[in-house]
Amino acid sequence: MTSANRLSPLEMDAIALRHPHLLQGSSNKRLRTILISVGLVVYLIFSWWFFSIGHVLGNANWGIAGTYLADWVSYEVRPEIRIARDKTMTLDYQRNSPLGHNPNPSWVVLDKETVTRTVEIPASTTQASKPKTSSSFSFMTPGSALGGANAASEQSRTETRTDEVITRALVTLNRSTKIEIADGLVRATHGGETLTMAVDGQNTVTPQGVLPTWATQKRPGEKITLAFGATGWAEVEGDEVSVRNRFFGWANFLFDTNSPFFGKSYGEVLKLITSGERIDPTRSNLSLAWNNILYNAEWQHLDVWTKLLQTVVMAFVGTLFASLVAFPLCFLAARNITPNFLTNQIVKRFFDFLRSVDMFIWALFFTRAFGPGPLAGMSAIFFTDTGTLGKLYSEALENIDDKQREGVKSVGATPLAVQRFGVLPQVLPVFASQALYFWESNTRSATIIGAVGAGGIGLKLWEAMRTNSDWENVAYMVLLILLVVFIFDSISNALRSRLIGQKAH
């Protein structure tokens, strides 16, 4: 529009006065948009205040969250160095160490000496070896039964021993992180900084200097926690240094520490299986290796796979039975198929009752009724899906094209034939598609209800999470569940696409 044809402000005002309805819609639309935006902002502010989101985010321990995530894809080796009053040390590893029964990692270097020292043995130790005395009451003065003055000397005794002890320990977590313990001092180096701590062999640890950012101590004398990020962490107490060295991967995934194949490379295992002498005279090395994998004490592969199969069967059987029961009932619930109002309402309310109770609640009910196991899970899926599929099936029947049904009826077909040839061809692909979707969805749901005792891998997953230390096992089971869900989702999508394609033709 040129400047000559452009309307002046006076002309625009005149048009607005003559035709106010032309501008009213635009004004109302802008006002509605503003009100919706303001309402959304107010709602977000209210939610932030009502759920204390700022407080939760401010007090969240993000370090622990990071540690949990790291536990899913890594494992820890935990050397624990105990420090005596005479500054000598002993070294132990956690029970069921991933390094086996006699761990000797190259990143832990020990200096040892043979020393002769005097050890004080408590009275409880000396008296434990003596025969138990009578418990009858005595009016003798205290100590008279033990010979008076000699009783005090028998309360404890000393003994001279010759032992091999650790005088210095060096734990190297990586190139920039190491911990050295010697002469009652603990020196931790990380990121170019060194922290020296004095330990007394009892319960007091004293830092010498200012604590770096990666070291924390709540109160003077208490333990000092050293955080080394993804590498691991350590705790320094007056009489002990506990190190957690983290390694990426899943330790002993194929063979546990009790297996004769433990610690061997893949090449060595392959050579033993193909051409090595029999480790167990009663079976081949291949059979022994497969047995060791299945019954791996740390990963429990056979038990996990069995529970996963239970979950798949629960989902399949529960969905199948729900589809078979919902199929005939949906014809009674459809108003255009069964015009009886009372019958429609009874069946529809029955569907509402079944699906209004969540599958999780049904699982709790049937676990109490039948006891823990897959039967409770299948029953929960069956009850919930019968109501949901029945409702969906009846709605699909109510939306069919009556022309096809009327055409079959016009040739004198029986009522059963009318449903068979005039109704089923229209709804059967929809029924099958919905049943396939629920089968795929119930594979995930069966995992959740398994956690309350309904069987399957859900229960095993919950048991691993409750220990708060087997997060690598949790990750393993989660990956298996995801793999099964992906496979079933692909199969379900392919079958649904095929059914819908046949319907289109």
Image (tube, rainbow, N blue to C red):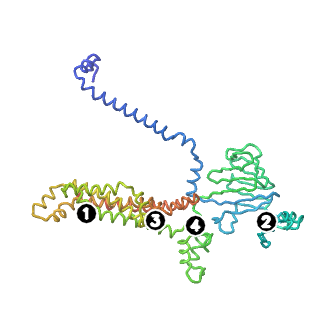
Amino acid type of the residue tagged 1 in the rendering: Pro
Dot 4 falls on a residue whose secondary structure is loop
Q: Quadrant of residue 43?
A: top left
Q: CA distance from mark 4 to mark 1?
A: 49 Å
Q: Residue 496, percent across and down?
A: 31, 60
Q: Earlier in the sequence, mark 4 or mark 1?
A: 4
- Residue denoted by label 3: 455
Q: Earlier in the sequence, mark 2 or mark 1?
A: 2
Quadrant where the N terminus lies?
top left
Horizontally, is 212 left or right of 271 in the view?
Answer: right
Amino acid type of the residue tagged 4 in the rendering: Glu
Q: CA distance from mark 3 to mark 1?
A: 30 Å
Q: Residue 297, percent across and down?
A: 57, 69
Q: Nearer the viewer, residue 462 or 444?
A: 462
- Give the crowd class for mark 3: few <14, some 14-19, many >=20 residues within 10 Å: many
Q: CA distance from mark 4 to mark 3?
A: 21 Å
- Give the crowd class for mark 4: few <14, some 14-19, many >=20 residues within 10 Å: some
Q: Nearer the viewer, residue 387 or 431?
A: 387
Amino acid type of the residue tagged 3 in the rendering: Gly
Nearest to the eye among marks 2 and 1: give it.
Answer: 2
Quadrant where the C terminus lies?
bottom left
Q: Residue furthest right?
A: 149
Q: Residue 180, percent across and down?
A: 75, 55
Horizontally, is 499 left or right of 410 in the view?
Answer: right
Dot 2 falls on a residue whose secondary structure is helix
- Residue denoted by label 4: 298
Q: Which mark is residue 124?
A: 2
Q: Which mark is residue 328?
A: 1
